[in-house]
Amino acid sequence: MSRYRTHLFLCTNERPADHPRGSCKARGAEPLLEIVKEEAKKAGVPGPFRANRSGCLDACESGPVLAVYPEGVFYTVRNREEIARVMVEHLVGGTIVRDLVISDPPRGS
């Protein structure tokens, strides 16, 4: 049994500015972590849940990336509205937010 019902990982990895894949931090991920926590509480995400920053989730081109476990769904989240949709539709309502899903498998760093 998992310690958390839901575990959220927001990539905040940083690469050099000239890296061809870019990075989630360069795409504005850093301030989104607090928004993830706020919107999860606001939506009433069933607990226990945990939201953490993470290193590279290997979907750099689609960042900022939010990974939801135990489902293993990876989302592109760029703002409060997209984060709120993930919390309400997926984590509370049980429906994956298809238009925000990153469907390609990791390419490797």
Image: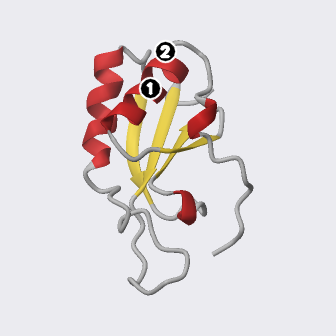
State the mark number for residue 9: none
How far is the residue under mark 2 from the one under mark 1? Answer: 10 Å
Tell me the crowding category of disc 2: few under 14, some 14 to 19, or many 20 or more residues within 10 angstroms, Cα based.
some
Above or below, 42 relative to 39: above
Q: Position of residue 31 (x, y in %)?
A: 25, 51
In the rendered image, which quarter is residue 73 located in?
top right
Confirm or deny contact between disc 2 and disc 1 (CB under 8 A).
no
Element type at mark 1:
helix
Q: Position of residue 39 (x, y in %)?
A: 31, 27
The mark total stands at 2
Q: Position of residue 106 (x, y in %)?
A: 70, 61
The three-letter code of the residue at mark 2 reads Val
In depth, the one of 22 and 108 nearer the eye is 22
Q: What residue is disc 2 on?
A: 92
In the rendered image, which quarter is residue 57 located in?
bottom right
Q: Quadrant of the N terminus?
A: top right
In depth, the one of 73 and 63 nearer the eye is 63
Q: What residue is disc 1 on?
A: 85
Element type at mark 2:
helix
Describe residue 75's horizontal placement relative to residue 80 as left or right: right
Above or below, 39 relative to 53: above
Residue sitting at 42 percent across and 35 percent down? 82
Q: Is residue 69 visible?
A: no
> Which label's residue is closer to the chain start, 2 or 1?
1
The three-letter code of the residue at mark 1 reads Arg
Q: Is residue 11 visible?
A: yes
How are the colours assigned in the image? secondary structure
Residue sitting at 51 percent across and 64 percent down? 56
Q: Position of residue 22 (x, y in %)?
A: 48, 73
Above or below, 47 relative to 50: above
Residue sitting at 63 percent across and 75 percent down? 109
